[in-house]
Image: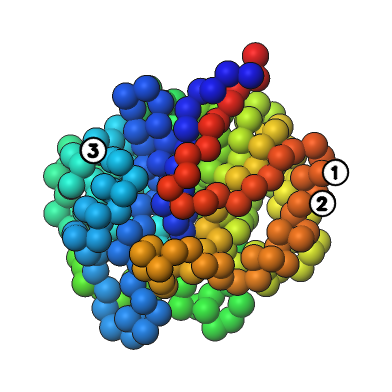
């Protein structure tokens, strides 16, 4: 086994990939607005973003990548790109965030799902995916399938950060799901080593859904390692430590036997603790 890169978790679905001199950041979320603040418009905090980048040891990035554009994935994306000088890669809805916040046009790259691109030393592919269905009435507020229709300038209401096009992101041989959903058959035979599975909301779906999700994402892609993200209470500040949100214990009680059945290791990502990403010879 060879260590190809390291992954460091920043809370929510924020994760840093390091390989040599190259760094990639997926779904940066450092502002972490408290729950009651969602009753008003929200905006990224440059100070919290600067502090969050420093805690993760980030000085430069080869790219900022978005799985989708809900606020807990995309609120801080443009400011992170501005502070690091990194290009932002994302969907047409991501383009509306970039335009609304005044990101220089040459720093935004609209992705085409299925195409490969190079970001530093990493090979990246955005693959089609979906967002987990929330129970009503939250699903209506979240506008699951809707794109962001026009440039969005913060401060804005959280529900204006619509989902847009959803991607699973393949970074070398690590496949990242920002939401616990899938397109059936889309990840078959990818020769993936690691799946990062965001489990936000998964604790409210039936056990049969968990099994189907695991088969379609982890088993189908050939992964040997499963890392769990998007498990923490993102309404709380990082300085308070990470606390679980949404029946994480129940979810893991059902995921661990699946990993044992199909022969993967499985673990929950911990804040700012690097994990080696290995590649089989």
Residue 206 appears anywhere in the view:
yes
Q: CA distance from mark 3 to mark 2?
A: 40 Å
- Which SS class for mark 1? helix
Question: 244 or 230, which lies in front?
Answer: 244
* Mark sitting on residue 261: 1
Residue 202 vertical placement versus 258 (above, below): below
> Counting other residues with Cα less than 10 Å from the Cα at mark 1, is it few (<14), some (14-19), or many (20 or more)?
few
* Mark sitting on residue 59: 3
Labels 2 & 1 near each other (Cβ < 8 A)? yes
Q: Work out whether mark 3 precedes mark 1 in sequence or the reverse, and give the earlier one.
A: 3
Q: CA distance from mark 3 to mark 1?
A: 41 Å
- Picture residue at 40% right of the left edge, 41% below the top: 16
Question: 210 or 12, which lies in front?
Answer: 12
- Which SS class for mark 2? helix
Which quadrant, please, contains the C terminus?
top right
Q: CA distance from mark 2 to mark 1?
A: 6 Å
Labels 3 & 1 near each other (Cβ < 8 A)? no
Q: Work out whether mark 3 precedes mark 2 in sequence or the reverse, and give the earlier one.
A: 3
Query: Which quadrant of the figure has residue 239?
Result: bottom left
Left or right: 4 as drawn, with respect to 106: right
Query: Which quadrant of the figure has residue 147?
Result: bottom left
- Picture residue at 34% right of the left edge, 33% below the top: 23
- Picture residue at 28% right of the left edge, 40% below the top: 58
Q: Which residue is mark 2?
A: 257
Q: Position of residue 185 (x, y in %)?
A: 70, 41
- Picture residue at 35% right of the left edge, 52% below the top: 28
> Counting other residues with Cα less than 10 Å from the Cα at mark 2, is it few (<14), some (14-19), or many (20 or more)?
few
Q: Position of residue 121 (x, y in %)?
A: 37, 22
Left or right: 68 as drawn, with respect to 30: right
Q: Position of residue 38 (x, y in %)?
A: 35, 80
Q: Position of residue 165 (x, y in %)?
A: 45, 53
Residue 15 vertical placement versus 100 (above, below): above
């Amino acid at each position: 086994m060879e260590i190809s890169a390291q992954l460091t978790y920043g809370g929510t679905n924020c994760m840093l990939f390091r390989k040599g001199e190259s760094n990639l950041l997926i779904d940066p979320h450092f502002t972490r607005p408290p729950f009651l603040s969602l009753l008003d418009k929200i905006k990224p905090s440059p100070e919290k973003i600067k502090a969050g980048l420093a805690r993760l040891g980030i000085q430069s990035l080869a790219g900022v990548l978005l799985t989708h554009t809900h606020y807990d994935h995309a609120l801080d994306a443009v400011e992170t790109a501005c502070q690091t000088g990194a290009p932002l890669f994302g969907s047409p809805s991501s383009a509306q965030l970039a335009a609304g916040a005044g990101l220089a046009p040459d720093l935004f790259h609209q992705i085409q799902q299925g195409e490969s691109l190079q970001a530093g030393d990493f090979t990246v592919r955005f693959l089609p995916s979906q967002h987990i269905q929330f129970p009503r009435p939250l699903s209506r507020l979240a506008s699951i399938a809707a794109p962001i229709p026009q440039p969005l300038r913060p401060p804005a209401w959280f529900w204006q950060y619509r989902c847009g096009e959803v991607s699973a992101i393949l970074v070398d041989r690590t496949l990242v799901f920002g939401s616990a959903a899938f397109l059936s058959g889309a990840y078959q035979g990818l020769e993936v080593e690691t799946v990062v599975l965001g489990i936000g909301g998964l604790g409210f779906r039936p056990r049969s859904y968990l099994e189907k999700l695991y088969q379609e994402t982890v088993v189908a892609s050939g992964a040997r390692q499963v890392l769990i993200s998007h498990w923490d209470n993102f309404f709380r500040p990082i300085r308070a430590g990470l606390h679980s949100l949404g029946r994480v214990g129940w979810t893991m009680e059902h995921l661990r036997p699946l990993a044992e059945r199909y022969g993967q290791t499985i673990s929950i990502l911990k804040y700012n603790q690097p994990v080696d990403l290995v590649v089989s010879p």
